[in-house]
Image: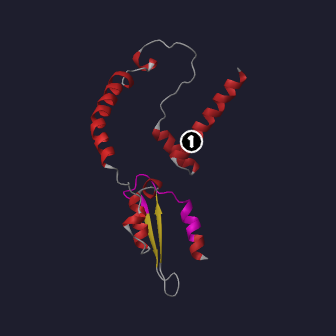
């Protein structure tokens, strides 16, 4: 019961992004008569990876290289085809990137006049102001940013429907 309450409280405490580690490991000795418990809390960027999958499997005495995701072996003819095509694909992508994607199409930044219907306008957000707002409301910068985005989209779609 105490562990359940502790985990409910711990679940609501975010891991600050500026911490050196993006995880917390909490050891609960004497969880029961013959057992201890280990609580591992991870930032989602840590927990989504394969490395922690093997860590958790090893902790449970379930580790096996076969249980981890991996690539299947390719037949020799596919390997040869990939070896031949890879340089061609890399060069074609480089050409496409340099001459097509790298072209600056930002009319505001490069001084070209805007043509057509103006759809959206944005301003830079002051990170310090977002941090103060988040702290004042007891939330994270991400939550404040998502609330701003949500309200902005709401206002935009109301405007579009009124036209």
Compared to 25, does 146 lie above or below? above
Give residue 94's position: percent from left, percent from top. Answer: 31, 29
Q: Is residue 126 left or right of residue 152?
A: left
Q: Quadrant of the N terminus?
A: bottom right
* Residue at the outermost bottom position: 33
Res. 149 image quadrant? top right
Which span of residues is magenta-colored?
Answer: 6-23
| Residue at mark 1 | 146
Mark 1 neighbour class, 10 Å CA radius: few under 14, some 14 to 19, many 20 or more: few
The residue that appears at 45% across and 17% down in the rendered structure is 107
Give residue 156's position: percent from left, percent from top. Answer: 63, 28
The residue that appears at 44% across and 21% down in the rendered structure is 106
* Residue at the outermost right position: 162
Give residue 13's position: percent from left, percent from top. Answer: 53, 60
The residue that appears at 29% across and 32% down in the rendered structure is 88
In the foreground, 60 or 36: 60
In the foreground, 90 or 155: 90
The residue that appears at 43% across and 61% down in the rendered structure is 23
* Residue at the outermost front position: 77
In the foreground, 6 or 161: 161
Indicate the colouring scheme: secondary structure
């Amino acid at each position: 019961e105490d562990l359940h309450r502790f985990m409910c409280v711990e679940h609501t405490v975010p891991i600050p992004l500026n911490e050196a580690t993006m995880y917390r490991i909490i050891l609960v000795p004497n969880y029961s008569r013959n057992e201890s418990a280990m609580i591992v809390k991870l930032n989602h960027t840590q927990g989504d990876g394969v490395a922690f999958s093997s860590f958790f499997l090893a902790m449970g005495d379930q580790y096996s290289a076969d249980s981890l995701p991996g690539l299947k072996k390719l037949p020799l003819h596919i390997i040869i085809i990939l070896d031949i095509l890879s340089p061609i694909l890399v060069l074609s992508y480089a050409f496409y990137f340099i001459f097509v994607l790298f072209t600056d199409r930002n009319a505001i930044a490069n001084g070209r006049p805007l043509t057509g219907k103006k759809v959206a306008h944005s301003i830079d957000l002051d990170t310090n102001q977002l941090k103060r707002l988040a702290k004042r409301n007891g939330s994270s910068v991400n939550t404040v940013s998502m609330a701003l985005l949500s309200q902005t989209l709401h206002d935009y779609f109301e405007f579009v429907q009124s036209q």
